[in-house]
Image: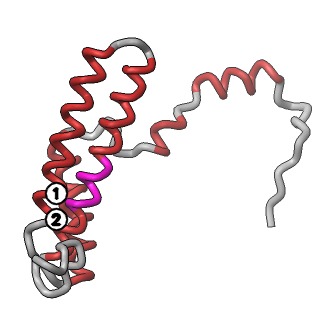
Amino acid sequence: MFYMTSSIPDGISSSDLQSLMENAKPDALSNPMQNADAKSQVSRVVDKIEELSDEWGTIFAYKLIADYCIHQLFQHHKEVSTEYFKEGNPEVAAAWSRDAGQFQVIGMTLRNIVCGHDDFLTADED
């Protein structure tokens, strides 16, 4: 078992540590796709979606994935709109709000399309 210590060894100066911290690139490890080209990004998304949808074995998996993605986009646009409104920029807030509304319509339309007997997103009366 390894344990971290709160002391700095005598052989390392504080200025050397500060320099290492300033030159470190933590984002490269936490966001490996951040600088990927378009082809790599699309390939990664397709691979992950196909892997996940294979677990269901039905077309409904694609609907569920799309519904989640659309909901996340709706929430983001709604939050950005709210922030711009709070900052006193109603024109920009309105544009973001309009786009949030578009995502809401897309989500409602998607949920009204039946994708098989296991589709729990479509209302029972449909």
Asked where in the image residue 52 lies, by quadrant, the reply is: bottom left
Q: Residues within 10 Å of mark 1 (few under 14, many from 20)?
A: some
Q: Position of residue 55 (x, y in %)?
A: 27, 81
Query: Element type at marker 1?
Result: helix
Name the residue that disc number 2 marks: 111
Q: Position of residue 72 (x, y in %)?
A: 32, 49
- Say if the magenta span includes residue 115: no
Q: Which residue range is magenta in the image?
A: 66-72
Front residue (pair 34, 79): 79
Name the residue that disc number 1 marks: 108
Query: Element type at marker 2?
Result: helix
Above or below, 47 against 9 in this view is below
Label pair 1/2, CB-CB below 8 angstroms: yes
Front residue (pair 77, 48): 77
Distance from Cα at disc 1 to Cα at disc 2? 5 Å
Above or below, 120 against 49 in this view is below
Q: Amino acid at mark 2?
A: Arg
Tag shown at residue 6: none
Tell me which residue sits at (39%, 29%) in the image. Answer: 82
> Quick one: which residue is furthest to the bottom in this view?
117
Above or below, 7 against 21 in this view is below
> Quick one: which residue is furthest to the front in this view?
125
Q: Amino acid at mark 1?
A: Met
Tell me which residue sits at (33%, 28%) in the image. Answer: 81
Question: Is residue 1 rendered to the left or right of residue 98?
Answer: right
Give the prevailing secondary structure in the magenta stretch: helix
